[in-house]
Image (spheres, rainbow, N blue to C red):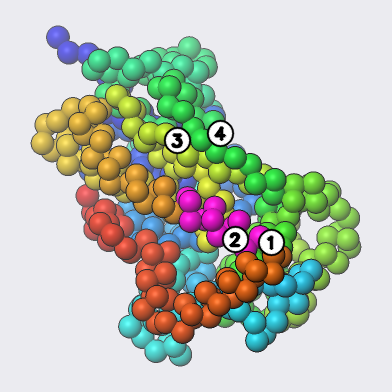
Amino acid sequence: MGDVLDADVIIAGAGLTGATLGLALASAGLKPILVDPQPFDAQVAPTFDGRASAIAFSSFRQWRALGLGPSLEPHAQRIEQILVTDGRGAGAASAAPGGAFLRFDAAEIAGRAADEPGEGEPLGYMLENRRSRAGLAEAVTAAGLTVLAPASVARVEFGGAVAEVTLADGRVLRAPLVVGAEGRGSVAREAAGIEVQGWSYGQSGVVATVHLERDHHGVAYEYFLPSGPFAILPLTEQRASLVWTEPTRRGEALRGARDEVFHAHLRRRFGDFVGRVAARGPRFVYPLSMQLAAQLVAPRLALVGDAAHAIHPLAGQGLNLGLKDAAALAEVLADAMRLGEDIGSVAVLERYARWRRLDNVAVSLACDGFNRLFSNDNPILRAGRGAGMAVVNRLGPARRFFMQEAGGAVGDLPRLLRGEAL
């Protein structure tokens, strides 16, 4: 007589990556259970997560394929251009117009003229995390997925044929596979004995939403300053999300600064190219660090998202790596189920690990390297990176490759990232 199981897959973590994975698995006929310490109502509150994320066009295809398009599209701001500038002085306003810069334009990869912003796919979409969480919560509820929240994983035991998850309230769940999607402090990862390597950058990301006097025209700005990147990312309703990297002590001071002091610092870095700016809503400060798991899988366990790789937010690739993980793992498990294989076996899970290992490590180390290269005022490095940016800016094929890579369209794409159902 076989084991009585509660689900095919237990997903620890119902955030953006975990909820996406749950929907993808359900769409292929598997039965997932989501476990999260925070109920969906708390996750969509404006004070829960002040960040906005750059969603690669391939990641947005996945959400559309899972039925999230109608709920997310009204809140998604198309990114039509990205302007990257190496700033020299105290703020973005001091970046010399004739200095080193890179310009990426969606028209170059979408087969359209530059004056047709409404045609074809953009470079990506800016979406406030609370909007993405709300759309995923609605879809998870509509799909009838089991969500245990608030509930936290206290212990995970991996047997020969089944994994057993004990919750903090004493409930026990059993399934052939557990997925760690609960972030940097993954209990599932620690239970499997998977080590992590990483370091702190001594920086924090100060995040705020501002209203702009002038239209941003879908342009995202990334200024590399000696203290760290300063990004101005377009949102709907003539707003922008700021990701303002500062040394940790200064970032904490900005969170508690009076409004007039905060705005004074903001104006020095922001410049006046979009007119007056006014901060709206709370400020958030997130410590920045790098963390990579030594393995993506173990018997009866797979890791996705920040549980596998937590990286510097430079270029907005962190969430997109997690969404790629979700698409690849869902496809591997769906195909294995249809073949009658044990979805929690190492043989099946290694297919997922081989698919995602190189991309995860390469992007993580690239973001780390770019941050170290640009977050300083060394004159030798400044000259070298200026020359490199000038060369790339003149080479159309190089620019187009970077845009396709950032959009998640390079390499062996999972079906969901191509916009296809499982």
Tag 3: amino acid = Ala
Main SS category, magenta section: helix
Q: Are marks 2 and 1 in contact (CB under 8 Å)?
A: yes
Q: Are marks 1 and 4 in contact (CB under 8 Å)?
A: no
Judge whether 19 appears above or below 156 on screen. Answer: below
Instruction: Name the residue tied to disc 4.
Output: 38
Which one is closest to the eye, mark 3 or mark 1? Answer: 1
- Asked whether 34 or 90 is in front, the reply is 90
Instruction: Name the residue tied to disc 3.
Output: 293
Give the mark nearest the N terminus, 4 or 3. Answer: 4
Residue at screen point 35% across, 40% down? 22
As drawn, is 224 to the left or to the right of 403?
Answer: right
Residue at screen point 33% across, 83% down? 111
Marks 2 and 4, how far apart in space?
Answer: 38 Å
Q: Are marks 3 and 1 in contact (CB under 8 Å)?
A: no
Look at the numbered disc 4 and give the secondary structure of its residue: loop
- The image quadrant that residue 271 belongs to is bottom right
Give the mark nearest the N terminus, 1 or 4. Answer: 4
Specify the segment rendered in magenta. 364-375
Instruction: Name the residue tied to disc 1.
Output: 376
As drawn, is 114 to the left or to the right of 27?
Answer: right
Give the mark nearest the N terminus, 2 or 3. Answer: 3
Which dot marks residue 113? none
Residue at screen point 25% across, 15% down? 160
- Which of the image's four quarters has the N terminus? top left
Residue 374 located within the stretch drawn in magenta:
yes
- The image quadrant that residue 305 belongs to is top left
Which dot marks residue 373? 2
Tag 1: amino acid = Asn
